[in-house]
Amino acid sequence: MNTFQYRRGELCCEQVPVQQLAEKFGTPLYVYSRNHIVGQFTALDQALQSVEHTVCYAVKANSNLAILSALAKAGAGFDIVSAGELYRVIHAGGDPTKCVFSGVGKTREEIEYALKLGIYIFNVESEAELRQLSAVGQRLRRRAPIALRVNPHVDPDTHHHIATGKKESKFGISIERALAVYQEASRLPGVEIRGVQMHIGSQITRVTPFVQATRKLLKLAAQVRVLAPATVRSFDIGGGLGICYKDQTPPTAQQFAAKVLPLVKNTGLRLLIEPGRFIVGNGGSLITRVVYIKKTPVKTFVITDAAMNDLIRPVLYDSYHEILPVRQSRSRKRKVDVVGPVCESGDFFAKDRLLPEVNAGDLLSVMSAGAYGMGMASNYNSRPRPAEVLVNGRRATCVRRRETLADLVRGEDRG
């Protein structure tokens, strides 16, 4: 689903011209398509309908309350990695009983908060965490529902920063150790074994790694059910479904389901899946205005009012984001670097990119910025973070106001 398209030479999000949004809300500006986001969730939800399942949106991808609210209304569960994300889900109207809690460093306070709210399951990352969960459960006179995040040692063929299922990863428990840890869990008084979980990485554009890892983990799941036949209810395949940034051809929801469902269909286990980028990635764009054109003997720089503090993915992951002029142009393309004003050489959105000729004052759209854009934004260089707008058909709503200079020092003291 592509909801950012040119109409009569104007880039639009759904039915709203991006130019109008920039004029009304200023730049830099994050613009999201509600119909894309809900549509991606619905497509995956329907593709999995032949088995009992829950699609748990990965909140870390984009945690804006309006997006969480739209997904909660569509029936989503949520994958959280902090108490703050759980708080956002509840505040947005999400159901805590449809939440899975992942992450390698859950604190005692976070565990207590989540357990009191009655989340569905904790994805356990270490033996130390398992014992902490049992201790908290005993103190609260509850049994913490758990699955081990098992590392199946499958290479997802993605960027090394976002590959999480290999032996050297900080995430998960080795598949060779998993059964022994499950046996320990079966003896702990404060936990209840509820399932098996994996998450092999992010931006995975082939189904094969999911299939390989699922086959490995289902053998383990059968052994775990012998340990706790009355309580083991779920198999969590994790997240990581990729999107198209440039020329990738990731599987559709239907293509993914066609390969995975035959493996899990007759297990009697509820399938959990934790997509983030797949749902929001191509549903968002960062709109920025050109401030200056700077020419040197070797480079032409297009300097924008957005910067790496607004979208850090290009420097952090060497990631590609398509950049489009908001007003369609037929001018000859020239090779330029698109950079921001932050005082770092890593402050760029594109290097040696062929773009139509642009001038100071023109608007550009940095595409596929719905995931890990605003969520990873910062105030580096004391720059206020952008506003966020959610478009639904012809309607555009500011769902996060632009930060002010006063916001930069809120909560601080001169001492």
Image (cartoon, grey):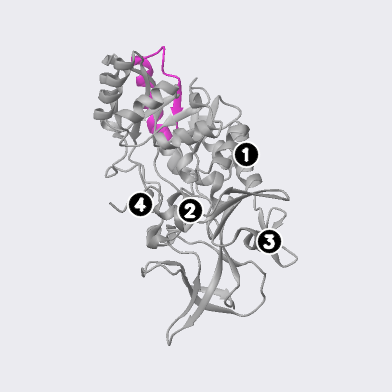
Residue at numbered disc 1 = 43
| Residue 83, above or below 64 | above
Q: Which amino acid does label 4 sit on?
A: His
- Camera-nearest residue between 299 and 304: 304
The residue drawn where x is 47% and y is 29% is 99
Q: What residue type is labelled 1?
A: Ala
Q: Do the residues labelled 4 and 3 touch (CB within 8 Å)?
A: no
The residue drawn where x is 29% and y is 13% is 189
Say which mark, if any, is on residue 89. none
Dot 4: element = helix
3D distance between C-alphas at marks 1 and 3: 30 Å
Mark 1 or mark 4: whose residue is earlier in sequence: 1
- Camera-nearest residue between 137 and 335: 137
Residue 190 visible from this viewpoint: no
Q: Tell me the mark number nearer the camera, choosing from 3 and 2.
A: 3
Dot 1: element = helix
Residue at numbered disc 3 = 20
3D distance between C-alphas at marks 3 and 2: 22 Å
3D distance between C-alphas at marks 1 and 2: 23 Å
Q: What residue type is labelled 2?
A: Gly
Q: In which quarter of the image is residue 85?
A: top left
Q: Tell me the mark number nearer the camera, choosing from 4 and 3.
A: 3
The residue drawn where x is 49% and y is 64% is 306
Give the residues in magenta: 214-237
Mark 1 or mark 2: whose residue is earlier in sequence: 1
Q: Are marks 3 and 2 in contact (CB under 8 Å)?
A: no
Residue at numbered disc 2 = 373
Q: Which amino acid does label 3 sit on?
A: Gln
3D distance between C-alphas at marks 1 and 4: 28 Å
